[in-house]
Image (cartoon, rainbow, N blue to C red):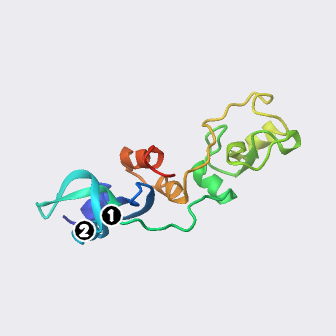
């Protein structure tokens, strides 16, 4: 199969799970096939597409041996909040002239947490002011959450992500 064709069809990337089923990386289909041939990984889910008319292209693979990951947490930073919210105002849906808003203002006891910070355009942030969304009669587009990992944040920026990848991040068998 031609790699350009793979990229256009959205099957050029493979999710790599640790031996514990925790997501740890996204690799190219070529690297995934190499790990499978060397028996360092096993295919968990396949795409149904064939490579060279005999090898099934994987979507998710799991390493046979556990690889220790030193730190898998995610730090609350402006950049990470922007990534989580896809650079989109969580009040009006626009994506220009953005800032960070505290849902419950700091003056009213709101803190710097994943669940209390969202991306907001300057206009909505000024309209909301020092009020809660309810007091300002504004609704959030989505519910703020703490992403399970940096890998998850970067994955959500990709296109054509198989549903099984999302399932791996929120699966009960995963340690995330």
Please tell me in which quadrant of the rendered image residue 103 appears: top right
- Residue at the spot x=63%, y=42% of the render? 144
Q: Position of residue 121 (x, y in %)?
A: 70, 46
- Residue at the spot x=27%, y=57% of the render? 43
Q: Are marks 1 and 2 in contact (CB under 8 Å)?
A: yes
CA distance separating discs 1 and 2: 8 Å
| Horizontal arrangement in the rendering, residue 171 relative to residue 61 (left or right) | right
| Horizontal arrangement in the rendering, residue 9 relative to residue 85 (left or right) | left
Residue, disc 2? 39
- Residue at the spot x=43%, y=68% of the render? 67
Of the image marks 1 and 2, the number of the one nearer the N terminus: 2
Q: What is the secondary structure assignment of the residue under circle 1?
A: loop
Please tell me in which quadrant of the rendered image residue 125 appears: top right
What label does residue 64 carry, if any? 1
Q: Quadrant of the N terminus?
A: bottom left
Q: Position of residue 58 (x, y in %)?
A: 26, 57
Which one is nearer the viewer's eye here, 63 or 123? 63
| Horizontal arrangement in the rendering, residue 171 relative to residue 139 (left or right) | left
**Picture layout, residue 79 above or below residue 167:** below
Which one is nearer the viewer's eye here, 99 or 103? 103
What label does residue 150 carry, if any? none
**Would you call the spot at circle 1 few (<14 residues within 10 Å), some (14-19), or many (20 or more)?**
some
Which one is nearer the viewer's eye here, 123 or 50? 50
């Amino acid at each position: 199969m031609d790699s350009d064709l793979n990229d256009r069809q959205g099957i050029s990337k493979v999710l790599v799970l640790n031996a514990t089923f925790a997501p740890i990386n996204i690799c190219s289909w070529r690297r995934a096939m190499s790990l499978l041939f060397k028996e360092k990984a096993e295919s968990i889910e396949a795409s149904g597409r064939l490579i060279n008319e005999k090898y099934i292209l994987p979507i998710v693979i799991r390493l046979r041996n556990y690889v220790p990951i030193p730190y898998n947490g995610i730090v609350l930073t402006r950049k990470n909040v922007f990534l989580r919210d896809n650079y989109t105002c969580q009040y009006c849906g626009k994506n220009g002239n953005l800032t960070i808003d505290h849902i419950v203002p700091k003056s009213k006891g709101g803190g710097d947490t994943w669940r209390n910070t969202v991306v907001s355009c300057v206009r909505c942030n000024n309209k909301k002011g020092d009020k809660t969304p309810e007091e300002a009669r504004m609704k959030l587009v989505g519910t703020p959450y703490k992403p399970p990992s940096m890998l998850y944040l970067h994955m959500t920026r990709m296109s054509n992500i198989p549903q099984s990848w999302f399932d791996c991040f929120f699966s009960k068998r995963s340690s995330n």
